[in-house]
Image (spheres, helix red, strand yellow):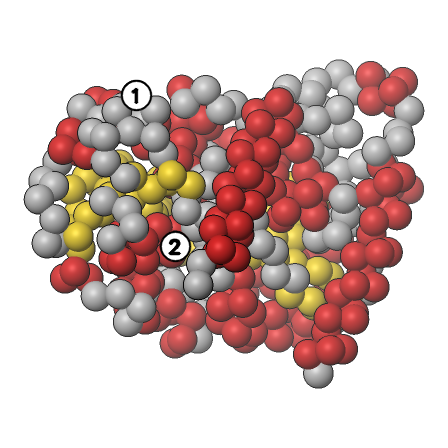
Amino acid sequence: MAQRIILAQKIIVLAFAAFGAAISLQPAAAQDACPNRGQLDDLYCDRDKDLVADTPDAAKQRDPSTLVWAYTPVEDPAVYANIFKPFTDHLAQCTGKRIVYYPVQSNSAEIEAMRSGRLHFAGFSTGPTGFAVNLAGAVPFAAKGLGTEVRGYQLLAIVKTSSPYQKLADLKDKKVAHTSPSSNSGNLAPRVLFPDQGLKPDDDYKPLMSGGHDKSVLGVNSGDYDMAAVASDVFERMATRGTVKKDDFRIIYKSPVFPTSSFAHAHDLKPELAKKLRDCFFAFRFPAAMQKEFNGDDRFLPITYQKDWAVVRDVAEKSGTPYNKNAYERESKREAEAAAKKAAEKKKAP
């Protein structure tokens, strides 16, 4: 069964690679005809100024028989294949289409997969959502919530309970973990919020990219890092699952609340399909296992990028990482270099 799924995914990747190549060769004249683009890539247009890519002309709209999706790799992607299985099964029945979960290993890989046409919808982490919108034509429409409330998360600065550190200023010249360059709580927000607490990234410490929130938490637990900037929802999930013990950590800083991961579909889905997908999302109720995993959230609720991601865009601008192509390429390069370094270190380990 696993081999058939892998083979199907490879076929889908090859099929959509051709589509990705095609859209990259659109005539410049057609792109220049757009009256408003804002921060969107040249492949997209925003005539209604809602900050997301417009649906293209009918000839360029897609209505595939198989829908491929992914969830943000804030933790091991394999974990979510099982967690989301009831949801994936629901979507298959609700849409009448085959649904394939496609695990991605990094934020940049997920964004590139949607840009090239390999992903039809996806859950993007808070920070990378802006890059997905501007560079991949993602249209955020939902977030996890409880009842009628879209719930958010906070940036936490965590240390070991046994450590001497009581405030952020105590971490000067210490080993501090960030997660990945494009992460909101794992990198961008600390750069904006920590200086007011007496700790300036790059000046007072050199951020060490762990590669993920779970890796940062585990790194603090093992002593690899003195402190880590992580998302509260990931930390809570790890404690709930028993991966770590909450009492082994002390939280020395909490930020204001940020919106949680967004769920977005590709801008070029046929409008009827996009509406059906949204309706199927909002009709789903999380089973008990998903509620436990997602801190009590029990459903998907509607959001818009323009309104609900305003605070995140503000952090990105103030951190010097606006959601444009240059910043994305810079952050993707850093992400790749950090991953390569960790892989090399792992290979050398006995």
Q: Residues within 10 Å of mark 2 (few under 14, many from 20)?
A: many
Residue pictured at 79% horizontal, 71% vertical: 7
Please give the label number shown on residue 215. Answer: 2
- Residue 311, position in %: x, y? 39, 30
Q: What amino acid is at disc 2?
A: Lys
Disc tally is: 2
Residue 256 horizontal side relative to residue 8, left or right? left
Above or below residue 60? Residue 104 is below
* Residue appearing at x 62%, y 75% in the figure: 89
Q: What residue type is disc 1 on?
A: Asp
In the displayed structure, does residue 100 sit left or right of residue 25? left
Along the line of sight, the residue nearer the viewer: 206 or 7 = 206
Tell me: 290 left or right of 66: left
Q: How far apart are marks 2 and 1 (CA)?
A: 24 Å
Q: In which quarter of the image is residue 94?
A: bottom right
Q: What element carries label 2?
A: helix
Q: Where is residue 47 in the image (x, y as percent from the top left)?
A: 71, 24
From the viewer's side, name the closer residue of 219 and 311: 219
Q: Are marks 2 and 1 in contact (CB under 8 Å)?
A: no
Residue under label 1, please give it. 203
